[in-house]
Image (cartoon, coloured by chain):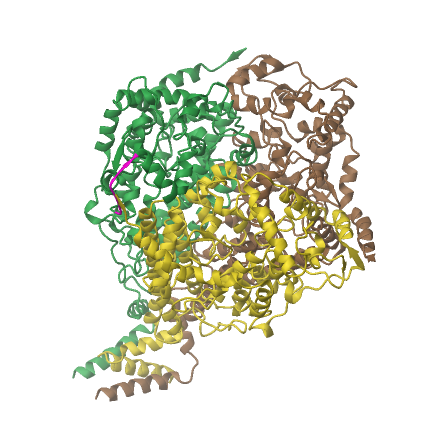
Chain colours: A brown, B green, C yellow
Amino acid sequence: MRITNLALLAFMAVAQLWIGNAFAKASEQSYEQLKDQYYKDHPGKGKHAEYWEAIPIQKYWNPKDFYKPPTTVTGEFTREMCVTCHQSTTPGAYHAWQNSAHANLQRIRDMSNGQDARYYKKEKLAEIEKNLAKQGLLVEGAQLKEVGCIDCHGSVGAKTIQHDKNLVMPDRAKCGTCHVSEFAEAESEKEQEWPQKQWSKGHPSHSVDWEANIDLAIWAGMPQREIAQGCDMCHYQQNKCDGCHTRHTFSAAEARQPEACATCHNGVDHNEYENFLLSKHGTVYQTQGKAKWNFEAPLKDALTKGGYTAPTCQFCHFEANGEFSHNLVKKVRWAFNPTPAIADNLSHPWFAYRKDAWVQTCSNCHSPGFAEAYLTTADKGTIEGVKVEQEAKAVVEALHKDGLLPGQKTNRPAPPKPETDSAGGFFQLFWAKGNNPSHVERVYADMWEHDLIKLYKGIFHANPGGFTYTEGWSELMRDYAMIMDENTKLREGKEKIGRKDVSHKSVLHAFAQDLSGRYVLGPLMVGVGLILIRRRR
Amino acid sequence: MRITNLALLAFMAVAQLWIGNAFAKASEQSYEQLKDQYYKDHPGKGKHAEYWEAIPIQKYWNPKDFYKPPTTVTGEFTREMCVTCHQSTTPGAYHAWQNSAHANLQRIRDMSNGQDARYYKKEKLAEIEKNLAKQGLLVEGAQLKEVGCIDCHGSVGAKTIQHDKNLVMPDRAKCGTCHVSEFAEAESEKEQEWPQKQWSKGHPSHSVDWEANIDLAIWAGMPQREIAQGCDMCHYQQNKCDGCHTRHTFSAAEARQPEACATCHNGVDHNEYENFLLSKHGTVYQTQGKAKWNFEAPLKDALTKGGYTAPTCQFCHFEANGEFSHNLVKKVRWAFNPTPAIADNLSHPWFAYRKDAWVQTCSNCHSPGFAEAYLTTADKGTIEGVKVEQEAKAVVEALHKDGLLPGQKTNRPAPPKPETDSAGGFFQLFWAKGNNPSHVERVYADMWEHDLIKLYKGIFHANPGGFTYTEGWSELMRDYAMIMDENTKLREGKEKIGRKDVSHKSVLHAFAQDLSGRYVLGPLMVGVGLILIRRRR
Amino acid sequence: MRITNLALLAFMAVAQLWIGNAFAKASEQSYEQLKDQYYKDHPGKGKHAEYWEAIPIQKYWNPKDFYKPPTTVTGEFTREMCVTCHQSTTPGAYHAWQNSAHANLQRIRDMSNGQDARYYKKEKLAEIEKNLAKQGLLVEGAQLKEVGCIDCHGSVGAKTIQHDKNLVMPDRAKCGTCHVSEFAEAESEKEQEWPQKQWSKGHPSHSVDWEANIDLAIWAGMPQREIAQGCDMCHYQQNKCDGCHTRHTFSAAEARQPEACATCHNGVDHNEYENFLLSKHGTVYQTQGKAKWNFEAPLKDALTKGGYTAPTCQFCHFEANGEFSHNLVKKVRWAFNPTPAIADNLSHPWFAYRKDAWVQTCSNCHSPGFAEAYLTTADKGTIEGVKVEQEAKAVVEALHKDGLLPGQKTNRPAPPKPETDSAGGFFQLFWAKGNNPSHVERVYADMWEHDLIKLYKGIFHANPGGFTYTEGWSELMRDYAMIMDENTKLREGKEKIGRKDVSHKSVLHAFAQDLSGRYVLGPLMVGVGLILIRRRR
């Protein structure tokens, strides 16, 4: 017998070059280097800083740049006082913490059964103590007693805090003080580079999601800041870790369940969660998983100690080449949305290797043959969607170019700066005034940003209704039909009425134009007149 | 150190005046008073009674007015016979009851561990026995043995029942016989008064939801009674308690879980459930809550015995000033839907105190600073939505006023009485005939009743996609664009063609008008004149 | 006392004739007969075979016709080698199997407690062993040791397999080798006959869902094969059993939970899952069921050992006349979508008896009076929907007949063969080119295939928002309004401008036509003629 996995082995070696690089580099850095780089990379208010001002709630989405301690509580408080006072002022936060690993380090340290799914935490704790010792925050060999309010909202190991002066809201670097390897993994997403510059370096990824947010012209320009900050409510992973590990439990078991991704990854252009839940992967999770799987097990033990019989979001997206990490973009191919620049380059080794890495992931449960066939199907199905979308795009852009969009010449305000006008642009999903956008443009914007993305995400997450009939393809067909219908009406209206402004004047003008120069005109009119007169007689 | 909570204390004292009143009053009433008032307040068939007749299923939604016992089962049955027979005729109902607290009062009475989350039921049982003794339904000091079929479907403590004569479907007052304080709490919602009469007294609330339903003109007027009764399937909380405590388990643990609210609070204009599930509150509930929280704990013990690390619907909406009750409207501010009458009055003390009460609620887990910042953001974001909706409203109403809606003059039937016609009215969501509503009106109706409400409910429930891109704001933009597009088309059509009816006659008219004063006019008119003169000769 | 259930008894006797027939017949067949019939009935590539070619992934949706073993793994492998190798190559599949009943038959055999919900499996195992003995696959009286890879992917009891030659993907008949009665039950769906031929024999049902799929003209004709195969991802129940019993656990407990149905029964025209979840049935399942019910209990013990206090999809749809089986169509009435052919025949005994069978189902928990009232309401509400849809249909078909659809005469490509053109046809949900479909047609297609179906499925699954305001009726009203609006615009445009092509020429033509017969006509034309002639001189 012979198993032809030589190709697979060869691939894995090369694949390391394509997808393993970034992490290797990041993990070699010290915490200080990581932290310095993190702050150096952080865009603060970003390139459109002059166009917007932070509103109060934003100090919680980006504490680094906007947070100031409250002045309502003054004075110096000890570690114990923090806990005592917050036990009554914010009891929910207190109890969450009180039942968390942070408040019960000894329980972790005392674990003796290697079969316990949480046993890995014992090693993790030792690693953290070593990290702190390296930074001089813990005596070499000493044990960390607890992680209390003051360690995160002040500084690790602090004895007291000036509540109105030194209180901080923890950012990535703060959590990274202890959790250095997770910080390094997460930051390594910034190393991602696209072979044909489909996206700029590091994009799209959690590690630059705040930057992506604030550098978006319409986000910065929108006058409705309370709506705009809704984007921040997800686009803050670059700033903080509690998007997945909700405070004040910071549970890894929570973060391993698909619902942890749901707040951000749902809806018209991020509907990964719905696709997962409705796929067979998701229904097994909901029936067998919720009842029987052990989410305390780390992802590497998911199939054994965890008892997983289907994947979760985390199992596939944290994995690359059989290793699990907080770098989620190592196998990214179509990324956020399908474009010709990706569709046309799938045979490039960068994409091909990543597809093979996906085959390896799927092969945890499926045969490589199935995995390859399904992924190819998903690629081709997505490309079909791109074709339809591109055809519609040309139609809408031509209407714009020809000045035929309703109100285009009479009532089309420019979008707020720094945004600039365009037909069917992204900004038209979040801003409207007068006839900007026209209805047909908005339909097209929905098409490329919603329908096409849902098609792509539905087919790749194996949710049949999610790309075939409920979302995706059938929606593309509906919006395509609407766009073509409108195109026909707007152009027939133009042809009918003349090439200039649409008014009764132009009707007459066109009429006259049409008549002029025709040899039949005079005789025809006379003839008609005579005939009609005769008939009356 | 100094903690500036004097303001908070002062607020709490005053807040009692604003939100604590109603309940204080209600709880002083005896069961007989409560019951009498309940039936006195009940609208029966309501103010549009002449326009509709109950269909058979409605006897279950409003048993007080429509229920008649079945004539298929005749004779007198004992308490035991009810149970025996229904064990085989409706086994599902039997088993549900048989495992419920009602069938196992002794288990509650025997509870000895004060740490058991259900221990509070022991006191509750004693309170109920006292209630029954007061009403002469139980000998003073005697123990209630069980709550069986006959107690609810006949009368408490009855020995026999005439199945075809005396069988009842329990209403609020029936459940209230034992559960007096819950009845009083629930009924106290009727005391709610709005400072600028944004809603009539008691509205909107569970305690008047049947009234709200049947007094709606389109509900009463719709010829499709089987569709209309779909509204009743939620709007019956005024009549019955099993909307939250499903028969025949009547579980408090069930009613404490968000899904208990889901049947009614989901969808295009009640999407609280979806917003909760997708918020971080909801994802923590789904990951940690389902696996670890104890829903047998009463809400007041939720954070301790219950182990909640995030709120449920019930935890926030049953609470006011730190107390939990079945009055859910003590902190209501924007209520069902955002309107200018609310948006313009948020600084009035009635609203301001309630906002502070919310800050107190959120402060169970969040800092007051966060709570205040978030609630202010939500207020302002909602107001932005109102602005857009009001602009669209003016456009649609002007089209109607100018008679420009498609078919407005030729094919616009009046809605069924007692409904009256209006542009973009609520009735247009449930009734359509010919060109009533026109498409643009329906889009506007969707806008104010769906998009705007989803924006408001999404932002207040902290579901980012629920108010930013999937629902809410982006939908408002889409519908606004469609309305403006249609407005431009309908008005350009009018301008182009003339001010009268849109037909080729008016084209001719406009044509002639336009020609006047142009060089062709004179000769043409002369020609016409000559011919006409000639024919007259 | 007297209980009038004579009618019920009489009904049950007759009902056997209507709904019990098929299964009785099927269960008498031997496995060989069943298998032969199964393959005889199987359509392979179906009646449109010439129009499409299978793409690689389809070998997994229909292995019988398209599967070929991979050539990458060659040689002969023993039973043990399969397991050993797949433990490392597909660990997820291995562990799923390893924890399944298939890998642990002895545990089932050793069960001694008759109260264990899974005790029925012991009898099932004995039945299976008897089945195998009958087929000569097990020595009479011998015990089945395990069900390993080779038994399903090779043949039952095989010692070795040629991986690249004999490997199979199991189909219905393969699973049926052991599970004969389930196979027979499932296949008995094919016996379903409609009294007025509303559907062809056996349709719609799982047992012919592959046939239904591939015999659909647009499915066969669509050039986008990767999208079309999305339909197969659900329409393969005729081919395989792992749509409900996910490999490689094949859990009955999984298949008894509503999520097992969700991958296929969700969305715009199959939204049973959403309707269930949001109904009170579903919310009780989510609160009480997930926490307390025992899904290991067979459906017949659901209310007792299972502790169900509300129904699941399976509890109602696998049941008929108090018996549970894999024939899900014994009580089907409205089937997939409401049509006049069904609406007009509900009083026919075939439908009436099935309604009574539903009353019996609901009466597990509800009174027959409630069940009857609710089902009648649902019938009538559905009929109201059909009326609206039929009115819209006539409008759209008239526009098509009158040649008034935008682009109808200039830019309406025919759909791909074997599909044929029609106004508002099913194909328009999945294919679009140029002005086929026009926007109004697509709205109508959404109306009958989505809105109306959602109304029907919402009302029958007791999800109020699912048929009243979020889906169903209100959507029907919206789409009706849009269609009437468009109809008015297209017809006014025609009337205004003339009966021919819409252009300024036709404006003139209509203008002339309209003038004819009027007293100004002759003179005007002569005048114009004269003037024009004069000007040319």
Quadrant for the N terminus of chain C, please: top left
* Residue A129 % position (x, y): 74, 23
**Which residue is rendered at x = 24% and y = 55% of the image?**
B414
Quadrant for the C terminus of chain C, please: bottom left
Q: Residue furthest left?
A: B537
Q: Residue furthest front?
A: C141
**Which residue is rendered at x = 49% and y = 57% of the image?**
C327
Q: Main secondary structure of the magenta part?
A: strand
* Residue B176 % position (x, y): 31, 29
How many numbered dots are placed on residues in this image?
Answer: 0
Please indicate, yes or no, whether residue C431 appears anywhere in the rendered image: no
Please indicate, yes or no, whether residue A152 appears anywhere in the rendered image: yes
- Judge left or right: residue C406 versus residue C221: left
Question: Residue B75: within the magenta?
Answer: yes
As drawn, C48 above or below B203: below
Span highlighted in magenta in the image: B72-78
Q: Residue furthest top?
A: B1
The answer to which of A184 and B373 lies nearer the viewer is A184
As drawn, B11 above or below B60: above
The answer to which of C167 and B73 lies nearer the viewer is B73
* Residue B445 % position (x, y): 36, 49
**Which residue is rendered at x = 83% and y = 52% of the image?**
A10
Question: Residue B452: within the magenta?
Answer: no
- Judge left or right: residue C496 versus residue C42: left
* Residue A277 % position (x, y): 56, 46
As drawn, A381 above or below A100: below
